[in-house]
Amino acid sequence: MSSLHWVHSISYGTVKIIVKIIVKVIFRVKIEGMENIPKIGGVMFASNHLSFFDPPTVAAVSPRYVHFLAKEELFKGPIFSTIMRWMLAFPVKRGASDRQAVRKSIETLTSGNVLLIFPEGTRKTGGSLVRIERGIGLIALKAGVPIIPIYIQGKYKLFQSVTIKFGKPFYVAQDSISDHTKRGDTDVAVHMIWSQMRKLMEESQAGSASH
C-alpha cells in the first residue's frame, strides 16, 4: 500500500468517525436496510438529495468506504480541495455533459468500490422526485453493478430525526448493450432507477404515516 493511500485511509477514517458522532448525536440519524449493502464488489448508491449534509452522512453510516460526485466549485482552493479528496469525492460539472466524470464513475464502480450518486443532480426539498440525469443511466449500464436506492427523510435540525433507508439492490437491464450504448437503453435504465427510488420513497413515507 502506497504512502499516499495510507494518508487517504487515515484521513477518511478520521473524518468518518467525527461525522458519525455528529450525525448520531446532533441529528439523531436512524438507519434502515443496512443489511442490503453487499460486503464486497462495486455498488452504486442512488439517493435523493435534501442537504449538503447528505454525502458525509451517508458515507459516515455506511459500513464501506463511499466515493461520491461533488460539484466542481467545491474543489476550488487547495485546502478545501484536499479535504474533498480525502473524503473520496471527485468533481463533476453541473448543467453540462461531463465525460471525464462519467468515465471516473464507471472506473470507480468496476474497480469494486461504492459510488454515491444523487440522480436528480442537485438538492431538492419536499417529498417528491423530479427527473433524473441521463448520465446516471449510462454509468449504470456501463458499470453493470448492483444499484441500491436510498431515501433520506427528515430535516438536519438540532436534535431532530433524520432517517436513511437503504433499499434492496437491483440491476438495470443490459440485454441490448453494445460498445455504443443506444439512447433507448439509457432511457430504460434511467426509468428503472427512478422507479426504484420512487418505490422506496413511497414505502418510507407510508411507513412514517402509519406511526
Image (tube, helix red, strand yellow):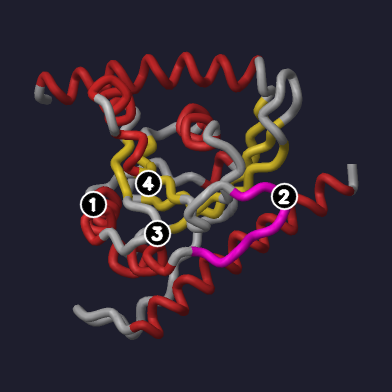
User: Image point 36% across, 82% down: which residue?
Assistant: 183
| Residue 35 lies in quadrant | top right
Lateral position of residue 114 relative to residue 206, left or right: left
Q: Is residue 91 magenta?
A: no
x, y percent for residue 159: 74, 19
Which stretch appears magenta? 124-132
Residue 125 highlighted magenta (yes or no): yes
Determine whether the residue tagged by mark 3 lies in a helix, strand or loop: loop
Residue 72 location in percent, x, y? 32, 42
Based on the displayed image, in which of its 4 quarters is residue 77 positioned?
top left
Q: Earlier in the sequence, mark 1 or mark 3?
A: 3
- Crowd around label 4: few <14 · some 14–19 · many ≥20 (10 Å): many
How far across and how far down the image is residue 124, in percent? 61, 50
Residue at numbered disc 3: 95
Residue 163: x, y in percent? Answer: 68, 36
**Quarter of the image that includes the C terminus:** top right
Taking depth in this image into account, of 199 and 38 the one nearest to the observer is: 199
Give the labeled residue for mark 1: 104
Location of mark 4 (residue): 115
Find out whether the residues at labels 1 and 4 contact each other: C-beta distance under 8 Å. no
Look at 28% across and 16% down and name the residue there. Answer: 10
Where does label 2 land, which residue? 126
In this image, 79 relative to 209: left or right? left
Q: Nearer the viewer, mark 1 or mark 2?
A: 2
Say above or below: 13 vs 164.
Answer: above
